[in-house]
Amino acid sequence: MRAPSLRVRRDLAGFPAYSPAPGRIYLTENGGRAMLGYCVMTGERVKPLPQRGTLCTLPVLEVRVTDGRWAGRRLEKGLRELARAGVRRVLTPEDFPWWPRLRERGFTHPDPGGLLRRLAPGVALAWLDARGIPRRRAAVALRGNSAAALRPAALALCGQVGGLILSAPGGDELEGELWRQFGAAVLPDGGKKGADLALVLTPGVPAGPAPALELYPGCGPPDGLTMDWEGLPPAGACPRDWLLAALWETGRLDPERVRLGFRRGGEIPS
């Protein structure tokens, strides 16, 4: 059964009709190049020519590809038009079968890692709640390659969890800030009280012995994490982390309004 596709609006008033002329620039509402493409398979007989529209308020160029024997050729035509328009990042339904082809042609999807790092405090609290670990008794380790990378999460978590462990160059200054602002002492790394959870906020940093969540650009959502927002389409229409990332990057999403949780069975390797 095919996953439901997003209903892409094509009602941008004031634009000339699409014409696949060589070198054509596809304009969005603000006169800039379209940031995203949206590729979807369909049983209808349609031409794979990009159509301007909006998807959850995002300006997109939608390419609909008729499924069947010649789907690959039709997709290639649509991808050439997207590339001509300067589009390199695309959204698709979750069951879209042509991602290997898209990657071969240089296309990618929005990276959710930056948003995940922004949501790190809420992700940590949701993980603790899902496992029945009282927040006020929990120790959370923050690990990164600089104190600046840890600071937003440390300020947000301080006072919500039992203790913080900081592991980053320059962490002493951040420890002092937490003491002055909250009267909170940071737990020693490797001390008697080990971490219940570690948040790794930059690449190339050892996670340590505690269960760890990697939350930085280039990472996908941790196993079992659920992300919801009131404006999202039905499940299956598009990977939610990709769509939320695109909305956040363009200032259309308030991270504080994202609802976070963990499904049972989403275990984190030690």
Image (cartoon, grey):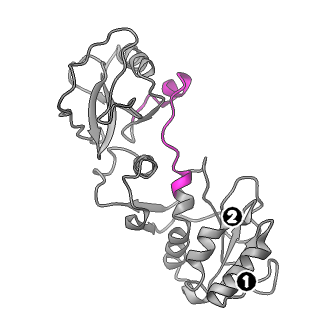
- Residue at 58% across, 78% down: 157
User: What is the three-letter code of the residue carrying label 1?
Assistant: Val
Residue 221, above or below 163: above
Determine whether the residue tagged by mark 2 lies in a helix, strand or loop: helix
Residue 13, how many percent across, how many down?
17, 32
Residues rendered magenta in the picture: 96-115
Q: Horizontally, is 67 left or right of 76 in the view?
A: left
- Residue at 73% across, 83% down: 186
Q: 184 or 194: nearer the eye?
A: 184
Residue 7, how many percent across, how many down?
23, 40
Q: Quadrant of the C terminus?
A: bottom right
Q: How many marks?
A: 2
Looking at the image, tell me whether mark 2 or mark 1 is earlier in sequence order: 2
User: What is the three-letter code of the residue carrying label 2?
Assistant: Ala
Residue 230, how many percent across, how many down?
29, 60
- Residue at 38% across, 56% down: 253
Residue 30, above or below 124: above
Residue 148, image quadrant: bottom right
Residue 32, above or below 216: above
Callout 1 crowding tier (Cα within 10 Å): few <14, some 14–19, many ≥20: many
Q: What label sits on residue 186 in the rendered view?
A: 1
Report which residue position mark 2 lands on. Answer: 148
Q: Is residue 97 magenta?
A: yes
Can I make out residue 60 in this image? yes
Callout 2 crowding tier (Cα within 10 Å): few <14, some 14–19, many ≥20: some
Residue 18, image quadrant: top left
Q: CA distance from mark 2 to mark 1?
A: 16 Å
Q: 137 or 19: nearer the eye?
A: 19
Tag 2 and tag 1, C-beta contact below 8 Å: no
Determine whether the residue tagged by mark 1 lies in a helix, strand or loop: loop
Residue at the extreme top: 22
Residue 37, how many percent across, how many down?
38, 31
